Amino acid sequence: DRSLPSFESLVGHLEFTEDRLALRGLRARFLGGELQAQGDAPGPGQLQISAKGSIPAASLAQFHDPSFGPRLPARIGAALSGALAFDARFELHDRRSTLSIDSDLSGLASTLPAPFGKRADERSPLRIESATSADGVETLRVHLRDDAQLVLERQRASGSAAAKLRRGAFALGTDAVLPDAGFAARVHSPQLDLDAWDALLDDTPPTAGSAVASSPPIASDASSFVPDVVS
């Protein structure tokens, strides 16, 4: 996937026989953090990789996949600190792939408005699941704790590195349901401070003395973050 950041300083062992391929002791730098992985290719068109690592919050804030729209405003990235430790598993079989990433977010601090603020020593279970069909349709599901969900669907054209976001849904305190088209939000929470979130999504350069005055503004279309349907 050309939209993913590159692996740097990659080292490890490649083992193979007439009918099997194995990856052992792989180590690399990924998004500014350390990654360890191992994998097997048990048969034609099959691949299984397990990995674990840690990514600094600053690198997470800077990562951008154009198919998911504009970059997040600088103020959101500035609200994260520390690092995210994770475990991941990738499987490929008959041109269909799945990716799962799990983290308890310990070590990552957030000063985002409620209900997404947390101390670094707090645990908040995060699970990310991606499933891509043989025809290039990817469904990405993100579950945070037991009350926040994000579902995105995108289409990748055959032979193309570019992917197009087709539809998405965000839910807080209820289930995320994909609309026929566009982006829908369902929020059932007494804690959501809309004014605070509106200030974070505003890309106007911060004034002198503010918490992120030293952070350069990132150009983006703030309207892209406004859902088509809210319930």
Image: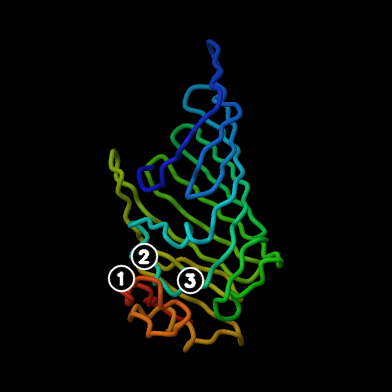
Asked whether, in this view, residue 82 is left or right of residue 139, the answer is: right
Is residue 42 something one can see in this rendering?
no
Q: Which residue is mark 3?
A: 78
Is residue 77 left or right of 106 when viewed as pictured?
left
Closer mark to the observer between disc 3 and disc 2: 3
Marks 1 and 2 close (CB-CB < 8 Å): yes
- Residue identifier under label 2: 71
Residue drawn at (55%, 76%) of the image = 112
Amino acid type assigned to the residue bearing label 1 in the image: Ser
Q: What is the number of the mark on residue 220?
A: 1
Which quarter of the picture shows residue 191? bottom right
Categorize mark 2 by other alpha carbons within 10 Å: few (<14), some (14-19), many (20+).
Answer: some
Contact between marks 3 and 2 (CB within 8 A): the answer is: no
Residue type, mark 2 in image: Arg
Nearer-N-terminus badge (1/2): 2
Task: Sort mark 1 into few (<14), some (14-19) or many (20+) by Cα contacts within 10 Å.
Answer: some
Q: Is residue 106 above or below residue 9?
A: below
Give the distance between the C-alpha atoms of the residues marked 3 and 1, in whole angstroms. Answer: 16 Å
- Residue type, mark 3 in image: Ala
Where is residue 44? Give x, y as percent: 48, 22
Q: Of callouts 3 and 2, which one flags the residue occurring earlier in the amino acid sequence?
A: 2
Q: Residue at x 44, y 76 (%)?
A: 212
State the residue in front, 154 or 222. Answer: 222
Q: CA distance from mark 3 to mark 2?
A: 13 Å
Q: CA distance from mark 1 to mark 2?
A: 6 Å
